[in-house]
Amino acid sequence: FQLPQHGRPMTNKRRLPCTRLRSTLEEEDVKTIGSDAAPHNKKTTKLVSSQSLDIPTNLISDEDIMLDLSSYENSLLSSWDESSQAGFDWEIEKLRRYFAGLRQRPDGSWVQKDSLFEFLITHTPKKYCWRRRQRGAIRGAAETTIGFGPSLGMAAVPDAVIQKYEGSFFSFIKGALGGDLQTLAGGPLFLLLAKYYQVHGPIFNLSFGPKSFLVVSDPVMARHILKSSPEQYCKGMLAEILEPIMGDGLIPADPKIWKVRRRAVTPGFHKRWLNSMIDLFADSADCLADDLIMKSQTKETVDMEERFCSVTLDIIGKAVFNYDFGSVTKESPIVKAVYRVLREAEHRSSSFIPYWDLPYADQWMGGQVEFRKDMEMLDNILAGLINRAVETRSEASVEELEEREVGEDPSLLRFLCDMRGEDLTSKVLRDDLMTMLIAGHETTAAMLTWTVFGLSESDPGLTKEIQAEVRTVMAGKDRPTYDDVFKMKKLRYALIEALRLYPEPPVLIRRAREEDTLPAGGSGLKGGIKVLRGTDIFISTWNLHRAPEYWDEPEKYDPTRWERPFSNPDIKDWLGYNPEKISSQFLYPNEIAADFAFLPFGAGKRKCIGDQFAMLEASVTLAMLMNKFDLTLVGKPEDVGMKTGATIHTMNGLNMKVSLKSEEIPETNDWWAQQHLSRGFSVNGRPFEQVAGGAK
Ligand code: HEM
């Protein structure tokens, strides 16, 4: 599956976010794609893309919608090159295209008619249709309340249901029977949700067979749901899926258990502990650097995604239970088992049929047998570590533990075990630790991977700015301190910008425990939206983080954006993004600064417990790399590709050439400040009217 490109041209399908942006986008629309509003004025319409085509516009009728080159469908179409257009698979694919409403013009271009399956999407009634409202067809807000709830509809499939999947029709059938949403959606599920968001707006209902989900892509609705979790909304199907792996760990825990465990685990992440972790992060980054020095000498290509996964696995093993996986330097059966368990957890979380619950599945289903064995191996290791910690338990109050020297064993396990008054069982500890192993490993690796990717495909000025910052702050040092990380703002913004474009996970899952009414937000529905008890909800962070309603140039990797405010009065009750709200306690602009349009670590009471840990870890690792090395992408950015489970991975690895740093502190020519000025802001990103005296 191909990666949608950052900075792709705006298309006629995009909605226009606010007055300030509108004029520039409209200009761009006409220039780049020949919107359906004005195609007849021109002889041909130039599509600006790597696949440029000249399309005679007399072939475009009013009803036809030109296929958006950055769209979901276009990625599917381009995955069938000429050599694969043969045989049974191809016949099925042709049928799929037909049913999905895709029609090819004699000139080779594609248009989109209504799909045969459109009726399966329950959404705002046609007269309140999102697109028509955006085009100005509907003035004012609709005076209605619509309700969504779990539906036991017919076996419903989205329009991309029959899709080439790993090259074989049989693997498609296998995936479909196994309930793999990714197979059914024909690609990463969140891209399907992004497509429907463009058409149906900030809230719609999606059905897969007997399952249906309310898909929410609105910050005001997201704020309501997340702030009323866990009382009003629980983890629902996510908990059901993850329970066999994480037990009652914090992520799947039901609200009652969660309350007790969250209260117990939170003190473990105290500031002194985080401070002491810096050395652990730096030791692991040193191991990585040694390896990269060798690769730079032999001029070998390095898969940086794989390297980041190894570093973060080693770190989380040491930090959580004082176990050295040593995966940067060696491959072991344990490391392989961890990865297989992670893959299975991801697969389960994107499957709507609990195949793992089939009778005796772990005795006869190939993958499940392996999974059982892997879990046994990991459980045995954890049991050994927990027993050892319990045997050497030395109880103390939380305050005493926070003051205690970290010593030989800095792990969370040690902290939790020694906490006075906690009624601990091995099962509780095992569930908490397993949860943190899974939650804290590939998420951080993905943030690092997509940051390096984002930098590699951006203007070189950006990398120079960050290198200059890192090399200035770290002058004469091998590793940064806690305070240094706070000083490296550009570096941290580069990291958090990667989480905006590649949120991990790209959807948050909730289930309504009681009937509720969501606020209208940008939907325009005055009475709000009624949610029935039991409704499964997907909050699409992917859509929230990439919608032009909430971000300027949303597809662009641009870490400078975090210094500029953004607002959109069209989204009722949304306060916009305000950099002045970034708390000095946090290492990143959090959900409050963006009023819930940005949820890199979730929000509300069930927000990530490891956010500061992850930001510190990634900042130290990246700073040490950028201090020593220059990294250059091998091949084209499109070759990197994207696939997903709970986190977004590359399809083909992040292959890079590494060279030892070429210069001390690069000359930047004020590149960063120029970004603000070129967008009509002052040098520090503030609007001119807010700068004292209005001076530039
Ligand atoms: C870049 C790295 C990370 C990202 C993007 C991330 C993201 C998230 C998100 C979005 C949630 C909320 C899920 C929801 O609302 O359903 C979450 C929860 C959680 N994360 Fe992280 N996480 C990261 C690193 C970590 C680390 C390093 C740890 C542990 C050391 C961790 C442990 C947890 C736990 C235990 C929860 C559940 C919290 C609760 O329900 O009380 N995460 N994470």
Image (cartoon, rainbow, N blue to C red):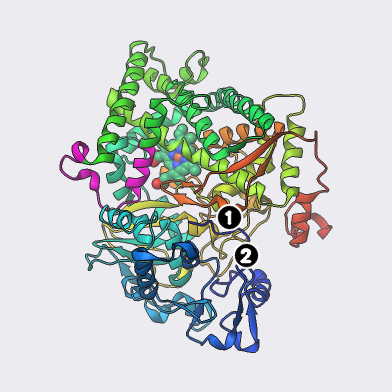
At x 19% / y 39%, what residue is drawn? 364
At x 63% / y 75%, what residue is drawn? 29
The yes-or-no answer for disc 2 within 8 Å of ligand 1 is: no
Q: Are marks 2 and 1 in contact (CB under 8 Å)?
A: yes
Percent across and percent down for residue 52 are 62, 71
Q: What residue is disc 1 on?
A: 638
**Quick check: is 342 in the magenta stretch?**
yes
The amino acid pointed to by label 1 is: Glu
Nearest the camera: 376 or 88?
A: 88
Drawn side of residue 41 relative to residue 538, left or right:
right
Percent across and percent down for residue 251 are 36, 40
> Does the rendering let one see residue 669?
yes
The amino acid pointed to by label 2 is: Ser
Q: Is residue 306 above or below residue 6?
A: above
**Quick check: is 282 in the magenta stretch?**
no
Q: Quadrant of ligand 1?
A: top left
Drawn side of residue 47 relative to residue 239, left or right:
right
Q: How many labels, in total?
A: 2
Magenta stretch, residue numbers: 341-364
Percent across and percent down for residue 146 are 34, 72
Nearest the camera: 208 or 231?
A: 208
Label 1 neighbour load within 10 Å: few <14, some 14-19, many 20+: few
Nearest the camera: 654 or 693?
A: 654
At x 74% / y 48%, what residue is drawn? 460
Nearest the camera: 601 or 525?
A: 601
Q: What residue is disc 2 on?
A: 50
Outermost left residue: 359
